[in-house]
């Protein structure tokens, strides 16, 4: 520790701390413009100059390290004169258009001038003018370069944090101007982080422009609904109407940054697809009715099907309280454990449960990625969890973290990684087995003899026999690190090989633990509350707390608290529920907030199955394809219309707050569950969000001790429940053969996340049209060029979209984003078959694009 005195106050700080950091700890205000907490100091704005005893000149506090016994003065006549002069120079060319500037009222330059600026300027020359009109850099970002104060925050944020390198500067000195390439941001992420960090009104949000003043806004701190990173965001509304999103530099895992979906994708709450009233099916058509009529009809229908099986499916975007109450409703009122929380894959809980219990780390992501090595398995972090990508890049820059990648699909992080292992689609399990074998071969002598012998007997196949490039280098990197983090994309769960992949992850983690490595493992969920959905027990084989349904003690404890018996046998997952439907054995299927018709990887099968259910109940905010098949449709509150909590990828529980009233006749999800339970002459207690959270904190081990009041701005981490590790190694799977067929995979794209974000008008203005991504080798072989219209055809169907040639893509891979409803991508797929074999050919007929759906159609 180092002692420093600032303005007469003495403080001990860590060696390497800056004077600015020490001053802020003492509550001493030192103004800055160019300084960003998460980036190395630039010291260009000169606003943070201070006097240091023994130094002849003023020193920038943001870039001056503390030394033992340093004495600093942060407010002296010389410093005040210097700050005033610096502000006078900035104002010399700054347009005085505050009344029409969107930044008015929250402008850092305004605040600085009021606090430190001159009362009269000494400059009398005409102001410099770069452009007479604002420049529209992109659909969401507009620039008034005349207001720029050359702090470089935007450029550094874009390059060093986001990694997009879309902004840069031209000219020098007072003529320096920030701009995009050729005055455009066509190649940028459109995340708007440059707008967030701009201290003045140089960079502005076009969708928010001229809509409101900051003092007109009612602001609500909440959590992003798009992916599982769990970013803090602040929603601004005016008279109940959504206006904008911003973030706070000192709150949340995201630390001021947001991705394009979080910053610009919340206008979906006002989508025109909202369900306005309850509906029931009459003469083959859905007819709006009152809640009373819907209740009378549903009571009769539930009575008619009560002798058959029941099942439920809920969205992992719903709050914990809603998910907890849903599984309680299904288990106690409908008397079934047949519940699931994903419409894209079925969770292999027999493998997932032990992996979560033994290795999953509920800890801040910032700490987790502080390890020597971070291995990302599967998926594409750039497009699934963009802010997690920013944090990983931070870790590589500040801590020299070694990033390792193993996946079929490339990402932008590959360029920053120490080792990249590209595997065949569906070959992640074999790739991991090769890495484990290479690790054992390299450092096997450090393992206990009996363990090594057991491992050799089951999975000691040499890496060279796998046919997969690079596992030896990856194993060597893991062996060198003292601590290792494994981040697992849930995209792996799409494959029929998910069970084997999770087993090999278990093998890897066990070997690393036996080698004495510090370990952390987390999932990279692409849905906001997937972790919460698992924790709340929205699984056919697991109760709340991820305890097995067959656990008599756990089941008895819950039943005693709920006042109702719980079935003792595991229920059916979504696949099995659909089989029950097709077989005529499903009475009531209750779907809440999710759309399996568009998401399930076999559109024909899921459509037939849902149509065969005796009673399909859909509870949703939006009129989805699944709602279009329902017999009863119940309008529910959407995101921002009810309070609750989400649990993010870290295991952090955060408060999701209400910032608008439910639209039309929609009711909260909890109120609808009470409504349905009453139709079966039962009651769910407790039934308010606060009381349900208290019950969760009492009955779910990982949440014990939490209180809503204590969640605070950053939420609170749930606790890992210690479980003795199971020393069992799993045999490696066969290596997938590299066939001649092209293989189709899917996932999220940068601008969309599932189908919720497709209801955002703003995102639809910046998102790419539906596209097909392929490698250079495959496109050359097929005679295709970037931008061609192509048909992707499988044994089940076909789609037409624009080709995007990606030089990073491996040969044999075809990627189509899952996020475009009109493509009906799942119409090409057959359940149990992933990746899907396809053919790709150029479209030679004349086509035109339907501007509403952005899908190409024949003329």
Image (cartoon, helix red, strand yellow):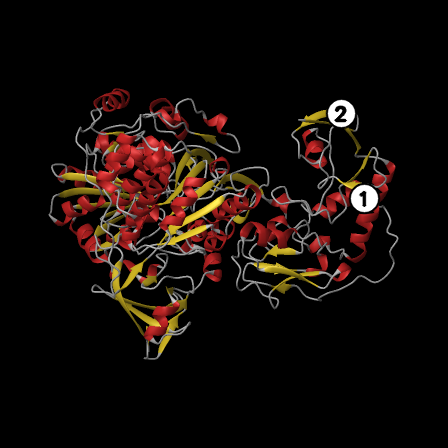
- Residue 296 location (% of width, % of height): 22, 39
In the displayed structure, 740 sits above or below 329; it is below
Q: Nearer the viewer, residue 668 or 640?
A: 640
| Mark linked to residue 724 | none
Q: x%, y% of residue 751?
A: 45, 56
Front-lying residue, 122 or 794: 794
Q: Provide the residue designation for mark 2.
A: 9
In this picture, residue 77 sits left or right of residue 842: right
**Residue under the image location 55 percent in, 58 percent down:** 140
Image quarter of the C terminus: bottom left
Nearer to us of marks 1 and 2 is: 2
Quarter of the image for the N terminus: give it: top right
Residue located at (76% from left, 55% from top): 96
Extreme residue toward the front, this view: 445
The residue that mark 1 highlights is 83
Please name whichever residue, 453 or 254, is drawn nearer the observer in this view of the structure.
Answer: 453
Q: Position of residue 835 (x, y in %)?
A: 27, 57
Residue at coordinates 71% horizontally, 67% vertically from top-left? 132
* Secondary structure at numbered mark 1: helix
Mark before the other along the chain sequence, 1 or 2: 2
Q: Is residue 773 above or below residue 363?
A: below
Taking 813 as reference, is 494 above or below it? Answer: above
Would residue 148 be found to the left or right of residue 292 on screen? right
Q: Quadrant of residue 748?
A: bottom left
Return the x and y of residue 483 as percentages of the image width and height: 45, 36
x 28%, y 49%: residue: 430
Answer whether labels 1 and 2 touch (C-beta < 8 Å): no
Is 651 placed left or right of 626 in the picture?
right
Q: Quadrant of residue 484?
A: top left
Q: Is residue 7 visible?
A: yes
């Amino acid at each position: 520790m180092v002692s420093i005195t600032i303005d007469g106050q003495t403080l001990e700080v860590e060696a390497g701390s800056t004077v600015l950091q020490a001053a802020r700890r003492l509550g001493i205000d030192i103004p800055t413009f160019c300084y960003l907490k998460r980036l190395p100091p630039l010291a260009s704005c000169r606003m943070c100059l201070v006097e240091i005893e023994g130094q002849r000149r003023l020193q920038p506090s943001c870039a001056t390290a503390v030394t033992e016994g340093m004495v600093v003065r942060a407010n002296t006549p010389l410093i005040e004169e210097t700050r005033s002069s610096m502000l006078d120079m900035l104002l010399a060319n700054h347009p005085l258009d505050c009344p029409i500037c969107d930044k008015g009222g929250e402008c850092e330059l305004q605040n600085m001038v009021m606090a430190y600026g001159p009362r009269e300027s000494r400059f009398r020359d005409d102001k410099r003018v770069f452009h007479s009109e604002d420049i529209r850099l992109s659909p969401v970002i507009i620039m008034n370069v005349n207001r720029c104060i050359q702090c470089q925050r935007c450029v550094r944020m874009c390059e060093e944090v986001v990694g997009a390198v879309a902004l840069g500067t031209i000219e020098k000195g007072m003529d320096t101007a920030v701009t995009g390439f050729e005055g455009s941001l066509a190649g940028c992420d459109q995340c708007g982080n440059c707008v967030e960090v701009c201290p003045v009104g140089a960079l502005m949000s076009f969708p928010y422009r001229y809509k409101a003043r900051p003092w007109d806004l009612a602001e609500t701190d909440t959590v992003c609904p798009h992916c599982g990173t769990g970013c803090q965001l602040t929603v601004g509304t005016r008279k109940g109407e959504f206006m904008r999103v911003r973030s706070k530099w000192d709150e949340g895992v995201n630390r001021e940054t947001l991705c394009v979906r979080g910053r610009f994708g919340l206008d979906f709450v006002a989508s025109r697809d909202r369900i306005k009233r309850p509906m029931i099916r009459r003469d083959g058509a859905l007819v709006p009715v009152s809640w009373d009529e819907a209740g009378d009809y549903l009571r009769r229908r539930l009575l008619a099907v009560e002798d058959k099986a029941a099942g439920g499916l809920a969205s992992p975007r719903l709050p914990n309280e809603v998910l907890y109450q849903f599984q309680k409703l299904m288990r106690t009122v409908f008397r079934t454990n047949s519940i699931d929380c994903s419409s894209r894959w079925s969770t292999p809980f027999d493998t997932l449960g032990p992996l979560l219990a033994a290795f999953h780390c509920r800890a801040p992501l910032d700490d987790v990625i502080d390890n020597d090595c971070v291995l990302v398995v599967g998926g594409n972090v750039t497009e699934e969890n963009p802010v997690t990508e920013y944090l990983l890049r931070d870790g590589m820059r500040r801590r020299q973290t070694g990033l390792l990648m193993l996946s079929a699909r490339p990402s932008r992080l590959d360029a920053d990684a120490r080792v990249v292992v590209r595997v065949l689609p569906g070959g992640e399990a074999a790739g991991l087995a090769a890495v484990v074998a290479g690790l054992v071969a390299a450092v096997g002598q450090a393992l206990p003899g009996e363990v090594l012998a057991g491992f050799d007997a089951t999975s000691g196949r040499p890496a060279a026999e796998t046919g997969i490039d690079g596992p030896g280098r990856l194993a060597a990197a893991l062996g060198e690190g003292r601590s290792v983090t494994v981040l697992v994309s849930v995209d792996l769960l799409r494959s029929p090989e998910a069970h084997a992949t999770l087993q090999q992850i278990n093998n890897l983690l066990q070997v690393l633990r036996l080698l004495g490595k510090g370990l952390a493992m987390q999932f990279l969920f692409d849905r906001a509350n997937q972790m919460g959905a698992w924790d709340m027990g929205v699984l056919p084989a697991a109760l709340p707390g991820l305890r097995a349904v067959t656990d008599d003690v756990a089941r008895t404890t819950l039943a005693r608290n709920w006042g109702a018996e719980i079935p003792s046998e595991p229920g059916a997952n979504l696949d099995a529920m659909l089989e029950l439907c097709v077989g005529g054995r499903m009475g009531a299927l209750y779907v809440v907030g999710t759309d399996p018709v568009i998401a399930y990887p076999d559109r024909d099968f899921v459509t037939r199955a849902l149509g065969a259910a005796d009673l399909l109940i859909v509870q949703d905010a939006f009129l989805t394809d699944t709602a279009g098949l329902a017999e009863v449709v119940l309008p529910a509150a959407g995101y921002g219309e009810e309070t609750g909590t989400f649990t993010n990828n870290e295991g952090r529980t955060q408060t999701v707050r209400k910032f608008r009233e439910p639209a039309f006749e929609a009711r909260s999800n909890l109120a609808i569950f009470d409504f349905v339970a009453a139709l079966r002459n039962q009651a769910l207690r407790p039934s308010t969000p606060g009381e349900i959270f208290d019950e969760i904190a009492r009955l779910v081990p990982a949440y014990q001790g939490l209180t809503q009041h204590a969640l605070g701005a950053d939420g609170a981490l749930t606790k890992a429940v210690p479980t003795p590790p199971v020393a069992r190694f799993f045999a490696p799977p066969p290596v997938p053969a590299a066939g001649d067929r092209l293989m189709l995979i899917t996932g999220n794209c940068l601008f969309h996340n599932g189908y919720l974000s497709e209801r955002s008008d703003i995102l639809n203005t910046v998102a790419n049209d539906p596209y097909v991504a392929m490698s250079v080798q495959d496109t050359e072989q097929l005679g295709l060029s970037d931008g061609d219209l192509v048909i992707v055809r499988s044994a089940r169907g076909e789609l037409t979209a624009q080709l995007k040639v990606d030089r990073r893509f491996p040969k044999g891979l075809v990627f189509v984003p899952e996020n475009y409803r009109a493509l009906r991508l799942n119409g090409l797929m057959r359940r149990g078959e992933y990746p899907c074999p396809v053919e790709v050919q150029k479209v030679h007929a004349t086509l035109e694009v339907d501007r509403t759906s952005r899908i190409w159609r024949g003329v």
